[in-house]
Image (spheres, helix red, strand yellow):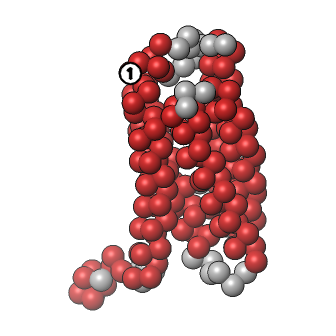
Amino acid sequence: MAYCIEHSGDIGMNSTSKLRLAASIGVCELTGLVGAIFTAPSIPVWYAGLAKPSFSPQSWVFAPAWTFLFLIMGISFYIIWEKGLEGKDVKRAMHVFGIQLGLNLLWSILFFGLRSPLYGLVDIVLLWAAIALTFSEFYSISRNAGLLLVPYIAWVSFALVLNLSLYLLNP
């Protein structure tokens, strides 16, 4: 009994798994931090000065929302990684995940860094498609990994509509 209590935190997760989980979450959160480098300087003046639709959330909502989304994306990726790299399906799913993560970062560069709602809109349409493909790939390997991406695609769907509205309202 003493052994179970003392080592209960180690059940089911070896040091390799812990490292994979930390790396998976870390890479996703780091992507968000790099994106913030392009985003933060544009918020107070450029973004604040844009005409916005009535459904536009307050600026403070975005940081906690994205922090949470990057966390669950990392957990989802970890679940797939734990399936092993032997299978072609796992490799393909991880590759697609990497593409969508890159498109996610690119959106911050295009929309906020270049201050271009049009370029951001083109990217976010591609991002949405890449997330949908990632969801499909992940779900076919692990239902839980796929389902963890549902809030992400829902948020990006909302962001796509918001991006389109910003483009139309700010010619």
Please report the residue visible at 47 percent of the width from the left and 19 percent of the height from the top: 46
| 159 shown above or below 24 | above
Residue 29 image position (x, y, % from top left)? 44, 53
Name which quarter of the figure residue 96 lies in: bottom right
- From the viewer's perspective, is 44 left or right of 128? left
The single residue placed furthest to the front in the displayed view is 114
In the rendering, at what x and y percent does residue 102 appear? 60, 53
Label 1 sits on what residue type?
A: Pro
Can residue 149 be seen at all in this image of the molecule?
no
Q: Is residue 83 visible in the rendered structure shown here?
A: yes
Tell me the residue at 30%/83% (across/down).
Answer: 7
Q: Which residue is mark 1?
A: 44
Q: Which image quadrant: the N terminus?
A: bottom left
Using the image, determine if residue 143 lies above or below residue 115. below
Q: Quadrant of residue 164?
A: top right
The quadrant in which the C terminus is found is top right
Instruction: Count how many numbered circles sit on residues in the image.
Output: 1
Residue appearing at x 60%, y 27% in the figure: 116
Q: Residues within 10 Å of mark 1 (few under 14, many from 20)?
A: few
Q: Is residue 147 left or right of residue 45?
A: right
Query: 53 or 98, which is in the foreground?
Result: 98
Q: Position of residue 136 (x, y in %)?
A: 76, 57
Q: Based on the displayed image, in which of its 4 quarters is residue 15 positioned?
A: bottom left
Image location of residue 100, percent across then percent down: 65, 52
Q: Is residue 10 left or right of residue 100?
A: left
Above-or-below relation of 111 to 3: above
